[in-house]
Image (cartoon, rainbow, N blue to C red):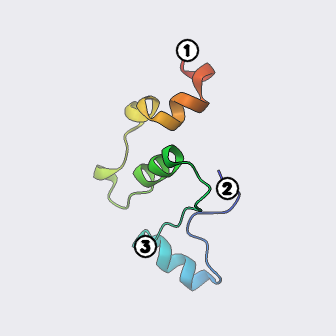
């Protein structure tokens, strides 16, 4: 969505730390719907992650993937 990985940091060590802590930073210009979708997908515990069968109910998906959902 923004052209950079969501956990990228200045160095590899800091990037890995951010990944393991799920220290997700989404730029302020990202829409609320996209931010919500990213935060539901990038969850450490897979049991709490957004399930594939619920993807098409997400507002960002419904808005930007209409042709694929028909």
Task: Name the residue tied to disc 3.
Answer: 20
CA distance separating discs 3 and 1? 37 Å
Q: In the drawing, what numbered circle is on residue 70? A: 1
Residue 34 as seen in the image, left or right of residue 11: left
In percent of width and height, residue 65 lies at 59, 28
Q: What residue is rendered at 57% in x and 63% in y? A: 6
Residue linked to disc 2:
2
**Secondary structure beneath disc 2?**
loop
Disc on res. 4 = none
Quarter residue 52 falls in: top left
Q: Is the residue marked by circle 1 packed among few (<14), some (14-19), or many (20+) residues within 10 Å?
A: few
Q: Earlier in the sequence, mark 3 or mark 2?
A: 2
Q: Secondary structure at mark 3?
A: helix
Q: Secondary structure at mark 1?
A: loop
Picture residue at 35% right of the left edge, 49% below the top:
49
Q: CA distance from mark 3 to mark 2?
A: 21 Å
Residue positioned 32% across, 58% down in the render = 45
């Amino acid at each position: 969505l923004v052209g950079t990985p969501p956990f990228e940091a200045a160095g590899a060590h800091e990037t890995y730390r951010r990944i393991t802590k799920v220290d997700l930073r989404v730029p302020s210009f990202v829409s609320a719907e996209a931010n919500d979708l990213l935060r539901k997908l990038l969850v450490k515990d897979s049991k709490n992650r957004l399930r594939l069968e619920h993807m098409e109910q997400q507002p960002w998906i419904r808005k930007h993937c209409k042709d694929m959902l028909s």
